[in-house]
Image (cartoon, helix red, strand yellow):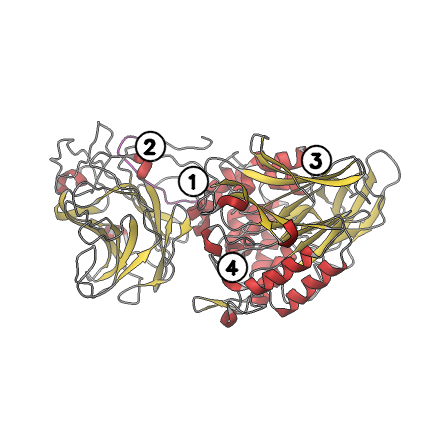
Amino acid sequence: MKNSLYLPAAVVCMALFTLEAHATALFSADFQGGADGSATVGNLNSGTQIGTWAGSSIGTSTLDTAGSNRGVLFGRDGLDVTANFSSVGSLTAGVTITYDLGLRRTGDPTRTMMMKGIDSDGNVLFVLGLQGHDRSIDVGYGRLVVFSEDFTGSPTGGGGGTITYLGTKGTFSKGTDAYNESIMHEVSLVLSASSFDVYVDGSLVENGNDIAYFSGAGTDIQALNFQADIAGGAWYDNFEVQGTGLSVQEVVLFAADFEGEIEFGPVTLSEAHRGTLEIDLRMLNQYEDQPQEVQDFYAACREAFTGETPESDVAAICQTSNRWKLGGPMLGDVTTTNVSVWTHLPESSVVEVTVTPEAGGASQIFQSSETNLMPAVRCEGLLPNTAYTYQVANADGQDLGGGRFVTAPTALTEETLRIAFGSCFHKIGLHRPELLDLIQERGNRAMLVLGDSAVDDRKNDFGLINADYLLRNLSPPWQEMTANVPVFAGWDDHDYWHDDSFGTETRGQWIDVEGLRKNWKSQWNNPDRDVEREGIYFQTQIGPIHYIALDTRSCRVNDARGALNSYLGEEQMNWLKAQLNASTSPYILLSSGTMWSDDISAGKDSWGTWDTAGREEIFQLIDAKTDSQVILLSGDRHGARGFAIPRPGGKKIYEFEAATLGGVPGPGAWADDPMNQLFGYTGSDFWAFGELSFSTVTNEPQATFRLIDENGDALETIVLEK
């Protein structure tokens, strides 16, 4: 794996990360326990340099299995042990706890393994457990639980207090005394000052957001206590605690790899959501090491973006670095005769774009109409279906890059017109070259990015939002593709604000809707970029193909869920109806950030739980189109799926979801009733984008869908029936 780092057996030390990338050991532990179950607390502390383990029992936990130094803390005969890292300083809000977790089950009942966050006064701030299964009362198994402060019952239920169940039953498979890596899941706790979020395998679990601390102030977490009842427990591995409390830069305060070997390879989704400097630099470098100058530039600009005078500070950094741009050129809004060229400059200026026919002929020069930090130059009056090269320069004549593009044809012909689409890059996929190269190499005239793309969970933090965009711009594969393939972009929850976010507030937290919309429009090269609307929705003609992109996040009416127009808002809904009624294109692509169908995750956070009546109105308008075929595009639910939604009179509406741009697995691939489903993938172990090709066959329009993986193979090929 590119840029993997292997550490010696049973020794884990993480680094205080600086631009020079030197390492300082903050915690290390060599767990030389006996495979016969004779391990003691002393074995935990063997070799520990900073921080200590303490406790009354680790039962017969096996700290060494088959000589590989793994398998700690399953506590078959009871467990009570505490990891103390107060010697390296008190942790503060911003801490993330990450570990691999598996459910051990041999006895009946298998009881809950509990982890408690403890402050410097010994107060318990939270209790997170992993629930087993009690056959005698048929209590569900295999999910995380959170206990209330006054909980007095058994871990499987009963007594005083409450249990909050996180996720669904069976998320964690039942194991045995023997360590089994296949049952392990990555769990992350992202801590803030007053609450924390829980992720499993990179996804926020149900009921796992904004869990309040008992004390209401999580700014002093100094220890983690692990407990388990007799005949209970769990397997832990690759445990680490990260926080920002000791330095301006990210540090790892506690780490232990119980498997004896840890690999720092591709960034996980939960890491991308956290988005620390160290994590983002790993993303930048994980497929190809970037020059140190680029890494230093990103780190310096990131700090400036989050400072008090970002524009002037970033401009000064660019001046010192002899850099004339922060991003671009990025193509967008291509039509039969026009294209738009976007750049991000250190200071407001005019830019000039020189466009030349690739086959030869006179060049044309286009200039931005006014000075701007992120101008989008509209190049008009071009020839249809024609290849051009272009070059961009600033007002001082300094080169800002260039590329090529092909304008759209006026009508469908026997020559294939290809348009790529997909969602859920989640920052990760923006740095992986295979898909981005293939989109260009296969001759796609445009790329439709449907959401969860360049920004991850930054809420209203515009400094970090703009740092995420800079990280996008510095990705060589992204630079190459967007300089040569026009991009159209919509947002979904993670790049809008946070997981399952919408409207003006989510979970009691205010969303700066207007600020987010304004910032989004400046950072992308979409049609209607300067049109004032309550939303970021837009429409355009990519030659004979009519593309309508909806805003399914910022226009939702928070207190009207389930009512007509609560999902798109009345203004956007009326606009959409007008677009559908007026369109005469043979094919209309209609994108929603979330899924149109309810078959995956029961319509979670989507049309099926918001506005089914409004969706039906849209479907009826689609039914009435006799000369146009509407194709629904969607995202949000990781994986890839296709549906043929049945309609009256034997008609059907196709929906294609390719939420696999970041290679992140999602929920079940197939609906409970797969009768109307064409294909399904969870997204495990592959990356893919959707591709629609249009042409005429015997003078009749024809559309074909393909799901293209990172090797260029078509996993699915579906010719659309009229």
Which circle's residue, 4 or 3, is located before the other in the chain?
Answer: 3
Residue 397 marker = none
Circle 1 residue: 21
Tell me: 159 left or right of 487.
left
Q: Is residue 20 rendered magenta in the image?
A: yes
How far apart, in angstroms, are the residues tagged by discs 1 and 4? 48 Å
Circle 3 residue: 443
Circle 4 residue: 608
Which circle's residue, 1 or 4, is located before the other in the chain?
Answer: 1
Quarter of the picture holding the C terminus: top right
Q: Position of residue 299 (x, y in %)?
A: 50, 48
Q: Position of residue 298 (x, y in %)?
A: 54, 47
Residue projecting furthest to the bottom = 559
How far apart, in angstroms, are the residues tagged by discs 1 and 3? 40 Å
Tell me the kind of residue under disc 3.
Gly
Q: Position of residue 403 (x, y in %)?
A: 72, 39
